[in-house]
Amino acid sequence: MAITTEILRSYRTPGAVVRRRLLDGVREDRALAVLMAACLVMFVAQWPRLAREAHLDPTIPLDARLGGALLGWLFLAPLFFYLLAGLSHLVARLLGGRGSYHSARVALFWSLLAAAPLFLLNGLVAGLVGPSTAATATGIVVLAVFLTIWFLSLAEAERPQPAMP
């Protein structure tokens, strides 16, 4: 199935999308590819805001700002998200979850990619409007949608796996 179709399905039934992705088995290469794609989109989403900031304060040039964002989103953020996925699995385990570390990673990484179009919208608003009520409201909506998709995906990922025939 096309990735864009799965992203759209994630807004309606995130648990079903994650369940289908988990049926592929333990594929760490796919999980990492999804995470890196999400981080790349979030890096691109920063461009309008960074361009605005560079225009308003030319003491730090745009290429320096982009370099910092690149380092943060493509090298440091993936490490943070791996840690966050592990912690979410431990919390789910304490609450009775029966998934694995891999399933928790798939749930988080897919949720990040599913929310990526909204991160792009948020970056565009931040770049065009600047710090404002509209930018804050957009950010809150994006965060709420991401957390909803992640919670529902993690709940599905932590359910006991059905026995394979």
Image: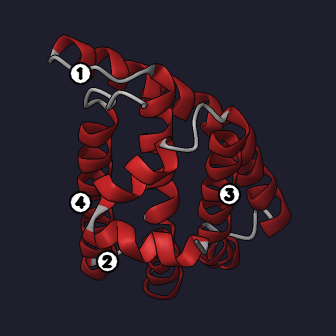
Task: Give the mark nearer the N terminus: 3 vs 1.
Answer: 3
Q: Under tag 4, what secondary structure?
A: helix
Residue 53 visible in image: no
Name the mark on residue 97: 1
Picture coordinates of residue 143 (x, y %)? 30, 58
Q: Residue furthest front?
A: 165
Q: Which residue is mark 4?
A: 144
Task: Please state which amino acid type lies under the numbered disc 1.
Answer: Gly
Picture coordinates of residue 15 (x, y %)? 30, 53
Task: Please state which amino acid type lies under the numbered disc 3.
Answer: Ala
Q: Under tag 3, what secondary structure?
A: helix
Task: Give the mark nearer the N terminus: 3 vs 2.
Answer: 3
Task: Tell me what residue is drawn at x 35 percent, y 22 percent.
Answer: 89
Q: Residues within 10 Å of mark 1 (few under 14, many from 20)?
A: some
Q: Residues within 10 Å of mark 4 (few under 14, many from 20)?
A: few
Left or right: 13 with respect to 6?
A: left
On the image, which quarter does residue 90 sit in? top left
- Above or below, comparing residue 150 to residue 3 in the picture: above
Task: Please state which amino acid type lies under the numbered disc 4.
Answer: Ala
The one of 6 and 116 positioned closer to us in this rendering: 6
- Above or below, comparing residue 30 to residue 115 in the picture: above
Q: Which residue is mark 2?
A: 132
* Closer to viewer: mark 4 or mark 1: 1
Q: Which residue is mark 3?
A: 37
